Each structure stands twice: as structure tokens, then as C-alpha cells.
């Protein structure tokens, strides 16, 4: 008999690990507390409370990464939060209970659908809902526009700290790009670790870690900018160093796919490149790996190209494509957006209705602050914070702990000075507490209770615990209700996106094989050096071996080097697979009533990953010999057949069919 806890309980007990983010801790200490103190000194305590709430929510979104990426990660949710604050304030002042409930339910439907677009959109949807509940349920003397302005100023204060303060250890260089530099260096470290793991059981995990490092670096470098291209030499150099890592990642993935251990000498080059990025220095001599296999020859060539990129630093393509408005709309209106939007709308609307009923029955007493119940529901219904049962357990435990801790502090701390200090300490703890949802809930509970007490609300720990448990019950009931359409929409949408990206990547590699024969074009040679680069042969690939894959168009002409386009498609395929894996892992940790809707998704994702890995290995072989062998085509055919069989009974991907011809 196994004593292992069920997945939903194991997820609730799991916490992230890592070094303490001291720079984020300093920013947290300088955000909510000082803003509240400034409001108290200026005799505008209510505005100080609003600004401190904004800084707290911005601190939750203040994650590791570059300054450029933080502008979007913090700024877009802040704008949505300011809009929600104004909307909630005016609606609460001029609408009755029924009309207000209907309006906030509609806001929940829109915010839930938008949250399916991605992490930043999810953060914006969260703040829109939370602030609309606070605006309607926390009566304050200021008008709606002034409260929205105060909220925006509070978030901008935290964002300003994020942009202005250097991270530890960055004072010796150009601290503007310390986040980008660390992210790019982590890619080279991940390549070296994958090469170390080739031929072992750790290779799969190391390949996943390499994908995560590439995603993080790509996000760090592609944040919002005033100009279209990098405007400084330091930034152009980082772009070139990131672009140079993509051929190395491709070669390392091909070596991991082959499964044959590589010499230790092959791992030294990427590690030296990582040190050069991190310390902003030249690479020096790079050890050359043996050229006994196609992937090793590709690794050697990639090291030569990286050495040239590091020396010249002229910039490079980040190999990412912007999402179009049509693509965003498809995510919002797709299966995942519809299911999530409906669930958020029902949970948020039900919590507003219950809070309104309690409010009009005088359950809250003389202080008509009824925002806690719907605001708690928002955090409980968000799937990117964990499975439903795990979120409910962590939220309940965290609220009880935070309320009890605050009740003890409220008995001994002077007012308002002691409470302001408590807010500052809680703000500093948020970056550490985000590693576990229960710990984050406890810290946020202490911070919010201190804020509202400074604003004039009496000590209400017992009431907050009761409201939190009521919100947990609402979300558990609504979350398990039968929904229109097919359940598991989020997983299906992610898998469909991963299948489409893998399909486009495979189609491009096969067209590249055909084009290399028809054009007879040699690859551009790396810079002159001591080692010679093997030329590609021109052995023909039968045209009947190439599939007619639908909707897999790649920009470029017949005379273009197809590899940059291939790297873009490869990045999109692995990123989509990583997002699908995350969604599948969260769905699998739900209670059985919800987890069963995603059965079979894990196997399909595993086959998709093997297909993309095999496609990468085929691309490396194609660069080396100019052709795909019969063995390459047989492996691809087998994977496509397996994928078609797995998906036949589930319809999770809906794109691949075993009849797709690969052999003539």
C-alpha cells in the first residue's frame, strides 16, 4: 500500500526553492510602507491605503528578470487595476445590489477570458477584478478618478524602484542590463549541463531546463522599447550573444537525442561563454570538441559562430514573433478562454452576490467593507496559482495564520506607527513568500489587515477568516459544476498550440531538405580559423518523402538562409510544449472529478516532445549532409503514427493524423 499523498495534497505541500531575492526584498520594504506613511503625514490616509495596495499587488508581479520585461509585467496589470478601481468606485456609488452584481459578473467573464492569453494578461485580469471589488466594497471619501490615480501612482512607485535600483553585484558594470546578462548566461550554462547529461537519465530534465532558460532569456530581451531595435552597443552585444546560443542549443538537443555520451571537452566551451556573458569580457580560446558525428560537428561550428558574435557584437535576431490581434482574440474566445471566463464569472458573481446579501443584512456591522469575499475568490479561481483543491487549502491555512498573527500584533503595536512598520515588513517578505501560496496568503493577509486598520476599519480577523472559508466553499462548488462544452479546455488549447507549432517546425525542416537539393546552396561558412568547416553535400531527397502539411508557412525567399527561420519555429515549438506541460501538470493535480478531463494529455505531450527533438536532430543531420536518410523519415513516421493513435480517442490535439505521408 502506497503512503504517498494524492496529487492535489502533494501540490499543496510543495514549495519553490532558491536563493533569497534580496533586491526584491529591499524594493518591497521601500514600497507599501513608505507610501502609507506618506499618506498619513499628508492627512490623506485613504489615498495612502490605495497606493499601498497597488504597490503590494505590483510586488507580487515583481519577479526575477530584466528591467525591460518588468515594465510590461508590472505596468500592464497596474493599468488594468486602475481601470478596475475607477469602475468599481463609480458602480458602487450609483448602482443597486442587483445591477452591481450583474456588472461585476460581466467584468469577471471578460477578465477570465483575457487571462487565457498569457501570464501578463492573467495578472491584468486579476488586478482588474480585485480592484473592482475593492472600489465597490471599500467606501472611501475620494472620487473614483482620484482613487484610480492614487492606485496607478502606487504601482508606478514600485516600478520606478525596479528600474532605478541595481541588483546586488551589478554595480561594477552596466547595471541597466544585469537581468538580461544573467538570463543569457544561464542559457549557456544550461547548454553545458545538457551536454554533461547526454547519455544519462538526466538528459530529459536538462533539456527541459534549457527550454526554460531560453524562454526566460527571450522574455528578458524582448520587453517594450521606444525604438524597434537595440539602441546601445551593450544591448546589441547581448542580442548577438543570445542569438549565438541557439545553434549551440540545437546541437546539444541533437546530441541528447542520440544518447551517446560526449567528451568532457565539449562542455567546456559553453561554460566559458557563460562566464564571458556574465562578466562582460572576451571569450578567449575555446576548446574544440571532436568532429566525429554530425551533432558534434554542429556543436563545433556553433562555437565558432559564437566566438565571432562575442567579438563583434553587432546584434542578432531574437527569433520571436509578435502575437497578432487575431491570435490574441483566438485565445480569448477559444475553448480555454471560454471555460476559464465562465468559471471566473460564476465564482466572482456568486461571491459578490453573497457579499451584497451580507452587507445589506448588516453582517459587517457599521463598517460596510464587503470587498474581502469577492477579492479572495479572485485569487482562489486562478488556475496559474495551482490546482483548485491546493489553492483552497493554502488560502484557508494562510488566511487563518495571517489573521491570528495580525490579531496578536494589533494588541501590542502603537497606531498608526506600529502598523505602518508592520506594512513595511510585510512588503519586504512578499518576494520570499511567493514561493508558496499559503505563505504568500499569510503575508498579504497581515499587510491588508494592517492597511485597512490604519484607514479606520476596526480589527476584523475573525470576520476575515469566516469570509475566506465562505469564498473557499463557493469556489469549490462552482469549480466542480458541469460546464457547457468540453471540460479541460485550457489543456486542450495548450496542446493544440503545441501541436500546431510542432507541425510548422517539422514542415519547415522538410521543405528545407527539399530546397537544399533544388537550390544546391551551401551554408555560409563561419569565420576563418584553425578548423575547417565541412561543406554540405547535395545528395537528393525524394520529393515524395515530403508531406503536404497544412498552414505551415514560413516567411523568406528561396535564396534566404533557412536556419534563422527554423530557429524561430523551434523556439515557438519548445515554448508551446513547455506551456502545455505546465497546464497538464496543474490539471493532473486537481481532484479526480476535474483531473479525469485531461487524461491522456501527458502521453500526447511526451510524443510531441520526442517529435520536436527528432525534428531538431534531423535538422542538424541536414546541415551536415544535405539530406534526410531513410532512417530519419522512418522515425518521424513512427512518431506521427503514434501521435495519431493516442489522439484518436481524445481529440486533444486535433491536428495530426497517422495518414500524414512521410514515405513515398
Image (cartoon, rainbow, N blue to C red):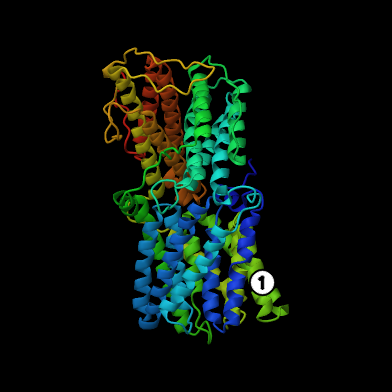
Q: Is residue 452 above or below residue 305?
A: below
Residue 270, quarter of the rendered image: top right
Residue sticking out furthest to the bottom? 366
Residue pictured at 49% horizontal, 45% vertical: 235
Residue 510 in percent (x, y) is at 33, 24
In front of the other: 123 or 215? 215
Q: Secondary structure at mark 1?
A: helix
Q: Is residue 150 above or below residue 435?
A: below
Q: Is residue 65 above or below residue 346?
A: above
Residue pictured at 34% horizontal, 34% vertical: 504
- Looking at the rendered image, the quarter that the N terminus falls into is top right
Residue pictured at 69% horizontal, 77% vertical: 418
Residue 541 in percent (x, y) is at 31, 16
- Looking at the rendered image, the quarter that the C terminus falls into is top left
Residue linked to disc 1: 422
Residue 629 in percent (x, y) is at 38, 15
In front of the other: 663 or 658? 663
Residue 482 seen in render:
no
In front of the other: 218 or 97? 218
Residue 630 in percent (x, y) is at 37, 15
Q: Is residue 476 left or right of residue 98?
A: right
Q: Residues within 10 Å of mark 1 (few under 14, many from 20)?
A: many
Number of numbered labels in the structure image: 1
Q: Is residue 281 above or below residue 469?
A: above
Q: Is residue 285 left or right of residue 61?
A: right
In front of the other: 74 or 630? 74
Residue 16 seen in render:
yes
Amino acid at each position: 500500500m502506497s503512503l504517498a499523498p494524492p496529487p492535489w495534497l502533494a501540490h499543496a505541500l510543495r514549495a519553490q526553492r532558491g536563493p533569497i531575492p534580496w533586491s526584491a526584498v529591499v524594493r518591497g520594504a521601500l514600497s507599501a510602507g513608505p507610501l502609507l506613511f506618506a499618506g498619513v503625514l499628508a492627512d490623506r490616509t485613504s489615498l495612502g491605503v490605495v497606493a499601498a495596495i497597488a504597490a503590494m499587488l505590483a510586488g507580487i508581479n515583481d519577479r526575477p528578470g530584466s528591467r525591460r520585461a518588468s515594465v510590461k509585467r508590472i505596468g500592464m496589470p497596474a493599468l488594468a487595476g486602475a481601470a478596475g478601481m475607477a469602475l468599481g468606485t463609480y458602480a458602487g456609488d450609483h448602482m443597486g445590489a442587483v445591477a452591481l452584481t450583474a456588472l461585476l459578473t460581466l467584468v469577471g467573464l471578460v477578465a477570465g477570458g483575457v487571462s487565457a492569453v498569457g501570464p501578463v494578461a492573467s495578472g491584468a485580469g486579476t488586478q482588474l477584478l480585485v480592484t473592482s471589488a475593492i472600489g465597490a466594497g471599500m467606501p472611501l471619501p475620494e472620487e473614483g478618478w482620484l482613487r484610480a490615480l492614487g492606485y496607478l501612482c502606487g504601482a508606478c512607485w514600485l516600478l520606478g524602484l525596479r528600474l532605478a535600483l541595481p541588483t546586488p553585484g551589478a554595480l561594477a558594470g552596466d547595471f541597466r542590463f544585469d537581468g538580461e546578462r544573467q538570463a543569457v548566461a544561464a542559457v549557456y550554462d544550461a547548454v553545458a549541463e545538457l551536454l554533461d547529461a547526454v547519455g544519462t537519465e538526466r538528459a530529459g530534465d536538462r533539456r527541459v531546463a534549457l527550454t526554460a532558460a531560453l524562454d526566460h532569456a527571450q522574455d528578458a530581451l524582448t520587453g517594450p522599447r521606444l525604438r524597434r531595435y537595440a539602441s546601445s552597443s551593450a544591448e546589441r552585444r547581448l542580442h548577438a550573444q543570445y542569438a549565438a546560443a541557439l545553434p549551440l542549443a540545437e546541437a546539444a538537443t541533437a546530441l541528447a537525442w542520440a544518447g551517446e555520451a560526449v567528451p568532457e571537452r565539449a562542455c567546456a566551451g559553453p561554460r566559458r561563454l557563460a562566464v564571458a556573458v556574465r562578466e562582460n569580457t572576451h571569450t578567449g580560446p575555446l576548446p574544440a570538441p571532436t568532429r566525429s558525428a554530425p551533432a558534434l560537428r554542429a556543436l563545433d561550428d556553433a562555437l565558432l559562430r559564437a566566438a565571432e558574435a562575442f567579438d563583434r557584437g553587432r546584434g542578432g535576431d531574437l527569433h520571436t514573433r509578435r502575437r497578432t490581434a487575431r491570435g490574441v482574440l483566438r485565445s480569448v474566445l477559444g475553448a480555454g478562454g471560454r471555460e476559464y471566463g465562465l468559471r471566473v464569472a460564476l465564482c466572482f458573481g456568486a461571491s459578490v452576490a453573497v457579499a451584497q446579501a451580507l452587507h445589506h443584512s448588516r453582517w459587517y456591522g457599521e463598517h460596510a467593507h464587503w470587498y474581502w469575499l469577492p477579492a479572495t475568490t479572485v485569487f482562489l479561481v486562478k488556475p496559474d496559482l495551482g490546482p483548485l483543491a491546493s489553492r483552497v487549502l493554502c488560502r484557508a491555512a494562510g488566511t487563518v495564520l495571517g489573521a491570528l498573527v495580525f490579531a496578536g500584533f494589533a494588541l501590542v503595536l502603537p497606531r498608526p506607527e506600529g502598523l505602518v512598520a508592520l506594512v513595511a515588513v510585510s512588503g519586504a517578505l512578499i518576494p520570499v513568500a511567493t514561493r508558496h501560496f499559503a505563505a504568500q496568503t499569510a503575508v498579504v493577509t497581515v499587510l491588508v489587515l494592517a492597511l485597512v486598520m490604519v484607514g479606520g476599519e476596526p480589527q476584523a480577523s475573525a470576520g476575515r477568516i469566516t469570509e475566506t472559508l465562505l469564498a473557499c466553499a463557493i469556489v469549490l462548488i462552482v469549480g466542480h459544476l458541469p460546464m457547457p462544452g468540453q471540460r479541460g479546455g485550457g489543456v486542450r488549447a495548450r496542446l493544440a498550440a503545441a501541436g500546431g507549432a510542432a507541425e510548422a517546425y517539422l514542415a519547415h525542416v522538410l521543405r528545407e531538405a527539399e530546397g537544399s537539393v533544388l537550390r544546391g546552396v551551401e551554408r555560409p561558412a563561419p569565420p576563418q580559423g584553425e578548423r575547417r568547416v565541412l561543406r554540405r553535400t547535395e545528395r537528393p531527397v525524394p520529393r515524395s518523402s515530403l508531406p503536404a502539411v497544412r498552414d505551415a508557412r514560413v516567411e523568406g525567399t528561396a535564396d534566404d538562409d533557412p536556419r534563422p527561420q527554423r530557429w524561430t519555429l523551434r523556439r515557438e515549438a519548445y515554448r508551446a510544449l513547455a506551456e502545455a506541460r505546465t497546464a497538464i501538470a496543474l490539471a493532473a493535480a486537481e481532484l479526480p472529478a476535474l483531473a479525469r478531463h485531461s487524461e491522456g494529455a501527458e502521453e500526447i505531450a511526451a510524443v510531441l516532445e520526442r517529435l520536436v527533438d527528432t525534428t531538431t536532430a534531423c535538422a542538424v543531420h541536414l546541415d551536415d549532409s544535405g539530406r534526410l536518410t531513410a532512417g530519419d523519415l522512418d522515425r518521424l513516421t513512427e512518431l506521427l503514427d503514434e501521435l495519431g493513435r493516442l489522439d484518436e480517442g481524445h481529440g486533444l490535439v486535433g491536428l495530426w493524423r497517422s495518414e500524414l505521408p512521410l514515405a513515398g
